[in-house]
Image (spheres, helix red, strand yellow):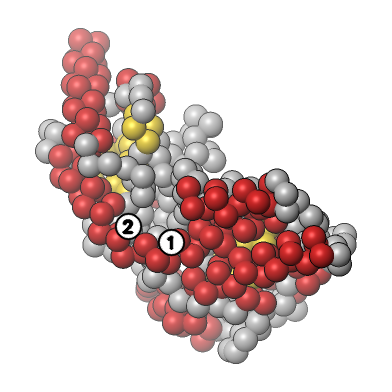
Amino acid sequence: MIYLDNNATTRIDPQVLEAMMPFLTDNFANAASTHAFGTGANEAVKTARRQVATSIGAEPHEIVFTSGATEAINLAIKSVAEQYQAKGRHIITLQTEHSAVLDVCKHLETKGFEITFLPVKPDGLVDMEVFRAALRADTILVSVMLVNNELGVIQPIKELAKLTHDFGAIFMTDGTQAVGKMPLNVDELGIDLMPMSAHKFYGPKGVGALFVRQRRPNRVKLEALLHGGGHEGGKRSGTLNVAGIVGMGKAAEVARNQLGTDALRVGALRDSLENELLQISDTRLNGNRQNRLYNATNVLFEGCDSDALIMGLENIAVSNGSACTSASIAPSHVLMALGMTETEAFSCIRFSLGRFNHADEIPQAVEAVKKVVGQLRAMSVQNI
Ligand SMILES: *Cc1c(COP(=O)(O)O)cnc(C)c1O
């Protein structure tokens, strides 16, 4: 099995699992309990909160732990809509956002909010002139993702945040594909809200966090989605997932220590894979080649149906859309936003690498892709 679907989810790093184990066994206490067992768990959560905050240049009290990025996205966008509607009811986002962001925005549309779903350029990047023109006095929130999950392109967050703040709006970026994979500082970039998820950077599934700016220049007011015991400063009730949170903290720390080595090693593997794949005739790279993360490549194989390609690749895990929407038969909304036809969008494969890929997997994957692409093209010629 060759796993090239790390943008869908990653394997837990052994160091992360080791840090979590005590909290799944002997140290099982509720972090809210005041006895010695509880305070131990509470200390571990505090450490994790510091680890996550440090990895993005935030303060510990600006981190709210959630069940993942989807919940953090819901919490962030719905809070801003609720808290800031006196200023206006206009929100700007991109057509290429993750379905969690798009679906929350569509839900708010039914509640009387006006959403601008901005198009992107054919390379997946936002057009700054188009963006500037979309900002209005009644804009309360801009949500533009940092790294796109299908293309890996990196949006110009710092410039977008600055323009957003000029209009007195809040700037959110979905950091799920960026956190733990690239250096990232919320102050330097001007980020007010940032959802993230542990399982995208070698932590466990079912735990994530929302960065909520509590310092100058923009203290963001949050409105709880989940009411109950008043956990997480009243922002997110429910007994804390101590083991998961400890795992997320450790994953953030490990990622911080390995940022450079991961980027160099995984980047070299991605480049070699991409170069080989683009040697195959009638292939094309999707998304901007310069402004992108090091771990993924999205390639169009003319004349090949991506579902058939995935099936044919048998023991190689790749993807043709985000895992969250690929259960549907619609073409990827991200690829369609690049201006592709449906047939083109159904001919693309995302290969996303990670810390646990080995160099010897690359030639194996390339050979397998060459073989299946050849077979599929031969079959379609016969059908004509
Ligand atoms: C995976 C992903 C999400 C959803 O994260 P979950 O923790 O699985 O809910 C949101 N946004 C992006 C960009 C993602 O890649």
- Identify which residue, 264 or 228, lies in the foreground: 264
Residue at x-position 62% and y-position 62%: 209
- Identify which residue, 320 or 50, lies in the foreground: 50
Residue 314: image quadrant is top left
Q: Looking at the image, is 141 positioned above or below residue 252?
A: below
Residue at x-position 32% and y-position 20%: 312
Amino acid type for the residue under numbered disc 1: Ala
Residue at x-position 41% and y-position 44%: 6
Residue at x-position 43% and y-position 51%: 149
Q: Earlier in the sequence, mark 2 or mark 1?
A: 1
Determine if residue 336 is in view: no
Reading the image, the residue beneath label 2 is 262
- SS type, badge 1: helix
In 3D space, how far apart are the residues under numbered discs 2 and 1 (Cα atoms)?
8 Å
- Identify which residue, 20 or 248, lies in the foreground: 20
Q: Looking at the image, is 350 positioned above or below residue 338?
A: above
Amino acid type for the residue under numbered disc 2: Asp
Reading the image, the residue beneath label 1 is 255
Q: Looking at the image, is 270 positioned above or below residue 367?
A: below
- SS type, badge 2: helix
Residue 116: image quadrant is bottom right
| Residue placed furthest toward the bottom | 216
CB atoms of marks 2 and 1 within 8 Å: yes
- Quadrant assignment for the N terminus: top left
